[in-house]
Amino acid sequence: MTYLHHIGAYFLMIAEMFRKPTKWSVMRTLILKDINDLINSSLGIIAFISFFVGGVITIQTALNISNPLIPKYLVGFATRQSVVLEFAPTFTSIIMAGKVGSFITSSIGTMRVTEQIDALEVMGINSINYLVFPKVIALLFYPFAIAIGMFLGILGGMAACIYGGYSSVPDYILGLQTDFDSFHVFYSFIKTFIFAFVLATIPSYHGYFMKGGALEVGKASTTSFVWTSVAIILLNYISTDLMLG
């Protein structure tokens, strides 16, 4: 019953988020601040991880192709498919659940502990709209960060070919172009938009409804990371089955 209570409270929070909106002049400032805090500050870690994981995928693929009858361009093909379909949208989102999700939960949870949310309610402000809605809008830009991750992942694979000699650059580029399906990119971005909404709302829920003091803020951040990751994995399975199955 506890799980059902939290699921119901979560969807009620989402419905409340659209009621009694904050005036645009204030909301615009909040959105721009959240874009900087959630998207801009994450570009570095996304770029770093994407580049080197793309290189690792290329190395692992090349080392496991030992049969001389298997064409070398499959190294580029496997890297492209791995990065575009799964690594960039899904695994990066799980990493962001730790970085972005913990930041959202701790910031809102701290406002709850210090009674700033109560002060917003006293002033007649819809605190859920004021705190959660800007984060949802800000994370609509999350697919742009994932697009950068896709590009750098493929670029990292090419760097591994150049400096490690695992495949020639022409073969790698041929693999990138072989059997390219633009729907796979569309599918990845659809998943990314879904994950962005989850990244904004589940950590916000755990921060907004937490009780206790500073210690409970840390516990809420850990809990939000776990459940955000679980939701991303489940939604990844469902969206893959629906769109590619």
Image: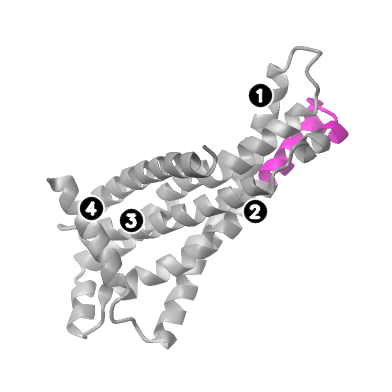
Kindly report the distance in space between the C-alpha atoms of the residues bearing marks 4 and 3: 13 Å
Q: Name the spot of residue 64 as percent of width and height, x first.
A: 68, 17
State which region is magenta.
152-171
> At x 54% / y 47%, what residue is drawn?
89
Horizontally, residue 121 falls left or right of residue 96, namely left
Q: Secondary structure at mark 4?
A: helix
Neighbourhood count class around disc 4 (C-alpha, 10 Å): few under 14, some 14–19, many 20 upward = few
Kindly report the distance in space between the C-alpha atoms of the residues bearing marks 2 and 3: 24 Å
Q: Secondary structure at mark 3?
A: helix
Horizontally, residue 224 falls left or right of residue 30, namely left
Label 1: which residue? 60
- Residue 165 part of the magenta-drawn span: yes
Horizontally, residue 198 falls left or right of residue 144, namely left
Q: Amino acid at mark 1?
A: Gln
The disc placed on residue 203 is 3
- Residue 224 part of the magenta-drawn span: no
Among the two numbered marks 1 and 4 on one chain, the one whose residue lies closer to the N terminus:
4
What is the quadrant of the N terminus in the image?
top left
Label 4: which residue? 7
Query: Of circles 4 and 3, which is in front?
Result: 4
> At x 23% / y 64%, what residue is drawn?
12
The disc placed on residue 148 is 2
Quick check: marks 2 and 1 in contact, CB under 8 Å? no
Is residue 79 positioned above or below 122 on the image? above
Among the two numbered marks 2 and 1 on one chain, the one whose residue lies closer to the N terminus:
1
Q: Name the spot of residue 227 as percent of width and height, x first.
A: 31, 45
